[in-house]
Image (cartoon, helix red, strand yellow):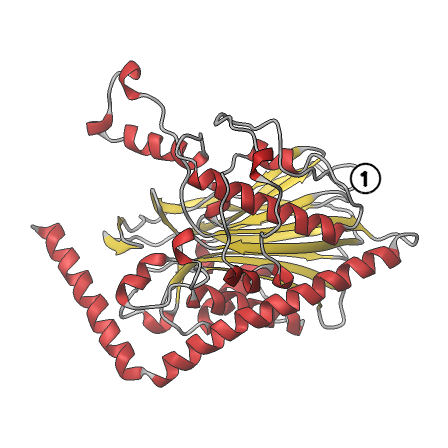
Amino acid sequence: MSVYMHPTIAPLALGGTSLHGRPNPGSIPSSHQRPRTRLTIATRLLNRSLLSPSNNMTSLSFRASNARLPVMHNGCTRTRRAATRSPVVTICESAPAGLAMVAAGVVVPHPEKVKTGGEDAFMIANSRDKGKSRRYSLAVADGVSSWSKAGVDAGAYSSVLVTTAREVLMSGDTEYVTEGSLSQKVIGKAQDSAKVPGSSTFVVASLDESTGILDVANVGDTGVRVVRKGEVVLTSTPKQHQFECPYQLASPAFAEVNDQFDSAADAECLSFPLQDGDWLIFGSDGLYDNMYDEELVQILGGVSTTDPFSAAQAISRELAALSQDHSLDKKRETPYADALAAEKESKEQFKRPAWMRGKRVGGKLDDITVVAAAVVARTEAGEGELEAALDAADAAAAKCSAQTKVVADVAIKANAENAEKQQRLRDKIAARERQFQQSLER
């Protein structure tokens, strides 16, 4: 399905690129069944030897969640959690060192939000810890659209989150991390600093070059896949209070308006040993609702360039383009259609004999963000080419982050200058909350 992308998305794509000039949609097969056997581009894994995988994985950490009551959350009823303890951190014992990560990304807004740019945001940061090794980091945030009903720019909060996270990581000051993972602490610091109304899912990941360990913290249904030798070897787990009601961050400064937000303590934390040749795919739910993992792996099935930055750009653009095609296809099988069918069949009024149910199909329209990252081992022979790719990625990331920061700064300034307007907003949202609670009591 051919979709015209408005030029206004160009600033949102890494390095000012958009999806214009993508392959002719006629090259996409008409079959609606998954997985597709033909793709619009061929993107193979970089041709390099792989280090031996490490299988020394152990679940270690647990956390307790607080008891909760029924509330409105992202436009749906949310039940507060009873106190439980569940494993949330996977620790690996060893991993190869000397790994670099070359990344590129793209944001494709919902077709009805092209003029505003949508509510997703991402950042890429390559930095050095003070006196330590180089660190490669990524983040993706997906703003909750229901805030727009209260007159709030639903994309501002996600922009502030990723901007703050990048500033923290680029500073190289990670000494404040005393417990929990670095990515989890960055989420906490970003949430505390983002004093604007709104809420967002958020995933942060970081690779320490000296250890080769990928550190991920994920709140909500943004997520990551690690693909190795044509197989998905790491998958984050979406966390939601109920169907289409994911865990999400919000500013503590607006607690009197929305005190039912989640925090870094609610994040799924993963620690995973990477290898040379691995691919990391980070995305908002717009990607993972519309594309199965096997389709994603197929996109990583061939390559026409050995330059990791060019490959990362091509992969992120193709995944975003194909995901949007799927979101507009009402006859296609998608993960979202599968989840919707399971949700409906779990409710008593939808239970019918198997022969009466039929199969649910169709994608889900949404903002789509994809960040693709190639993991490359540092070698003396390839050092020059790798540094050139990292320089290109850094330049594009800086340009993209500068544009995102403009959105964030406007939101922060508007919030600071309009205290009276914000108070009216608080009163309005609080009144809606009271009305909803009263409707539950009837």
- What residue do we see at 23% from left, 51% from top? 70
Q: In this view, does 322 lie above or below 214?
A: above
Q: Position of residue 21 (x, y in %)?
A: 62, 50
Q: Where is residue 403 in the image (x, y as percent from the top left)?
A: 56, 70
Q: Find the residue positioned furthest to the right.
A: 381
Q: Position of residue 371 (x, y in %)?
A: 60, 52
Q: In this view, does 364 lie above or below 16?
A: above
For this rendering, which residue is in front, 225 or 178? 225
- What residue do we see at 62% from left, 53% from top? 215
Determine which residue is flagged by label 1: 47
Numbered marks: total = 1
- Which amino acid does the dot numbered 1 rest on? Asn
* SS assignment at label 1: loop
- Residue 232 seen in render: no
For this rendering, which residue is in front, 340 or 127? 340
Q: Position of residue 109 (x, y in %)?
A: 46, 55
Q: Find the residue positioned furthest to the bottom.
A: 417
User: Which corner quadrant of the image does residue 344 belong to?
Assistant: top left
Q: In this view, does 310 lie above or below 292?
A: below
Q: Is residue 240 left or right of residue 73?
A: right
Q: In this view, does 427 lie to the left or right of 318?
A: left
- What residue do we see at 35% from left, 45% from top? 244
- Residue 136 seen in render: yes
User: Which corner quadrant of the image does residue 252 belong to?
Assistant: bottom left
- What residue do we see at 24% from left, 31% from top? 347
Q: Find the residue positioned furthest to the top.
A: 355
Q: How many neighbours does mark 1 have within 10 angstroms: few (below 14), some (14-19), or many (20 or more)?
A: few
Q: Is residue 7 left or right of residue 170?
A: left
